[in-house]
Amino acid sequence: MDPQVEKILKLPTKQKLLILAAVVVIEAAAMVWFLYIPKYKEEAKLKDDLAKLQTEVDDKTRIANNLPRLKAEYEQLSKELAQALTELPNSKEIPSLLTSITTLGKNAGLDFLKFQPKAEAVKDFYAEVPVDIFVSGSYHSVANFFAAVANIPRIINITNVTFSDIRNVNNKMITKVSCLATTFRFLDKKEMKDDKKPVKK
C-alpha cells in the first residue's frame, strides 16, 4: 500500500473527514470551473445567437409580409416618376415648347409685344427656364391663353401677372399684360460636374 495512503488512514477520523471534504470541494470546484462554466457560457452565447436569429427572422418575416404593399408603392412611384418625366422637357424640347406657347397666345387672339427667354436658373438636377411675356388683347383672350397654357402637358408656372393700359375698344376691354412664364427641364449628365454641381450653359 502507498505510504501516503497508510499515513492518511492512520489519521484521526476528524482529520480524515476534513481531507475528504477538501477533496470533494476541490473536485466540485474543478468540475464547476472546467465543465459547468464553459457550458454555461456556451449556452448563454447560443441563447444570444438564437435571439439574434429570431430577431432577424422576425424582421425578414415582416418585410416578406409587407412585400405586396412595397411592390404596389414602388409601382406607383414608378408611374409618378414616368409622369414627372413627361412634364419636364429636356433641352432639345425647350424651343418647341416656347414656340407652342406663342402659338397658343396668337390662337387666343393676343398680340405678342415681347417674348424674351431669360437666363436659366440651374438647380440640383433640373433648370428653371423663365420667359418674360408681354401681350396685348382682350380680357377674354388673356383668360383663354392662360387656360391653354395650363392644359399643356408640361409644367409651366405663370407668375408676376400685371395688367396695364386698360381701355375700351369697340365695346371690348383691351389690356396689356406682362407676366413671367417659367418652365423646367432636366439637366443632362454632361451638365453635371464636381460632385453633381450643375454647370450653367
Image (cartoon, rainbow, N blue to C red):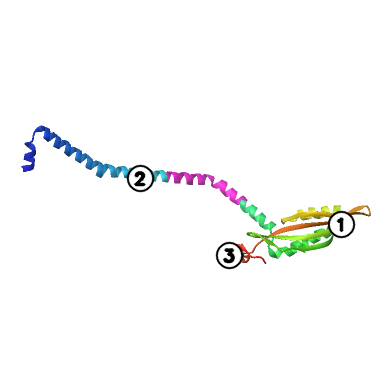
Q: Nearer the viewer, residue 90 or 80?
A: 90
- Where is residue 184, by image quadrant? bottom right
Q: Badge 3 is on which residue?
A: 194
- Where is residue 8, by image quadrant? top left
Q: Amino acid at mark 1?
A: Gly
What residue do we see at 76% from left, 62% from top?
Answer: 98
Q: Nearer the viewer, mark 3 or mark 2?
A: 3
Q: Residue 96: x and y, percent? A: 75, 64
Q: Earlier in the sequence, mark 3 or mark 2?
A: 2
Magenta stretch mostly in which secondary structure? Answer: helix
Q: Earlier in the sequence, mark 1 or mark 3?
A: 1
Q: Residue 192 vs residue 166: left or right?
A: left
Q: Amino acid at mark 2?
A: Lys
Helix, strand or loop for disc 2: helix
Residue 137 image label: 1
Q: How many C-alpha atoms fall within 10 Å of the one at disc 3: few (<14), some, or many (≥20)?
A: few
